[in-house]
Image: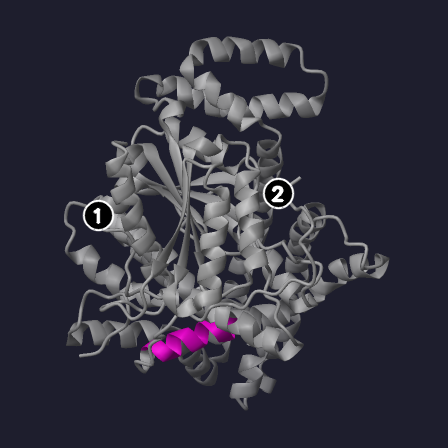
Amino acid sequence: MKTVAGSQYHDRTQRVLEIATGAMSWSFFIIVIVVSYFSIVTAAYILIGYTLWWLTKIFGYSNRLIRAYWRMRLSRRVDWQLRLMDLNDTELALERLQLRLSKAKNWRERQVIKYYSKYLVSAHKARDTIMPPEDIYHAVIIAIYNEDAEILASTVQAVIDSNYDAHKMILIIAHEARGGAETAAAARALAAQHAPIFKTAVAIEHPADMPGEAKAKAGNITYAARWLTGYIEEQAINPEQVMVTTLDVDNRPSPNYFAEAAYCYAITPNRTHNSYQPIPMFFNNIWDAPALMRVIAVSNSFWVLMEALRPHRLRNFSAHAQSLQTLIDVDYWNVASIVEDGHQYWRTYFAYKGEHKVLPIFSPIYQDAVLVEGYWRTFKAQFYQLRRWAWGVADTPFVLRRSFHEPEIPLSSRIVHNFRQIEGYLSWVVAPIILAGGGWLPLLINVEASDSILAVQLPTIVSLIQTGALIGLLAPIASSLMSLPPRPDRYGPLRSVMMVLQWAFVPVTLIVFGSMAALNAQTRLLFGKYLEAFNVTEKKRIARPDDTRN
């Protein structure tokens, strides 16, 4: 029986769960419509309650965004490479830090010191389990299909420019055989050119059409990670000493990323049971992308930033890091999965019997907003990218079934994780549509609604709540303006004005590129129309990206 890529099950129960998962959003809409038809008052109270609930969530998101953005700003001012030396004697480092705090010249410097002190205090508490920083290696796997060689070169250069000893780094350019000879030649040339800089730099070609593999990123990076495991064994290095970061070809780590990741890894006692999630910032080409794509890019960036303050909800997304020992323990990535990052969270969670967390790294990794040749092709590419992300809903049957087979995981943990998995994908589809048009539903469905004062007033009530929710947009607007790279000379001041006015498109982006993309993914799962391949998002830049890392 054919089933969704990435699942270990191939039976009738699996298909029933896929149908139920795919139908959940449609079921919600049907229930609301039925209730609106038979009970106007009940429908009105449901819609008002749901809208008010989301109003409180929006203000909660805004509050976390402000605090998380401030933490990212403070983290940027910490010299993490220098701070790694503090781990050799945390008690002495704490004394020096207190002295620095007493001599701080201004408020901002004191805030940076106080921010870092929390990390140092944690390190001191875990001093008996600290891994010596000099023992830590970074392996960087850059996955490429057939993208422009200049984009790959800019990513490699960003790795080189990091504030970390390159001789403690292993660079792997993982390219696809089906990507063509030109891409392979570019990957080999870059690896050979920069090999003297790193401990080693190689180009690893992933063979085409390997049995059991989807045409997706997971097979490529798994093949590269298996090569890495062999290399580490030859070098007699403990796999626990190696952090593996996977990057897409357009990902440009900020200078502090590798040092901050190494610091967090060194001070975490149960380090192999964790994933390490940097903040993705889709800002490389933000000035060149169309307004709709800019709003989506900023929103996606800030969503992970907000979730970083709630590590219990954080999941692997896009570029992320794990110990090589962790990858060996979970058998790398699922090569049959289309969405390897989110699925990797669940594989690790179950492999370690629930003892798994995703820890935030507040150093960004800069990525491209969706931009291809022509507006219509750009819109299609954006829709396909978000549909691919929403295909993570296909993990829900896998999570439900594995939960029943893992009695060693506390029942409360399994219940909470299953609820978050289901609620997250349901809200992805339902919330924007209900918030935008739910207030008119009883009037449209029930012919007697015009006789109900509550039903007639419902659009006005919902509109007032929506107006209040618009205040919540002030935080992302302000944060986005402060996060933007410098405006390129090719654009005038009007482009800066548009960076503010573009937020009027939020309802469109949430419904068309959010709800509809997620609903498409769930409907495909419902009818068994599985995504068979990873739709690679075409990369296009008008010019060399401005430096977003300063």
Q: Say which quarter of the image contains residue 354.
A: top left
Q: Amino acid at mark 2?
A: Ile
Q: Which residue is mark 1?
A: 351
The reply to whether residue 160 is in sight is yes
Which residue is at a point 42% across and 47% down the rendered structure image? Answer: 320
Question: Would you call the spot at circle 1 few (<14 residues within 10 Å), some (14-19), or many (20 or more)?
Answer: some
The reply to whether residue 44 is in sight is no
**Above or below, comparing residue 300 to residue 109 in the picture:** below
Of the image marks 1 and 2, the number of the one nearer the N terminus: 2
Magenta stretch bounds: 515-525
Q: Is residue 159 magenta?
A: no
| Camera-nearest residue between 504 and 304 | 304
| Camera-nearest residue between 12 and 268 | 268
Per the rendering, the mark at residue 481 is none
Does dot 2 land on a helix, a strand or a loop?
Answer: helix
Q: Is residue 521 magenta?
A: yes
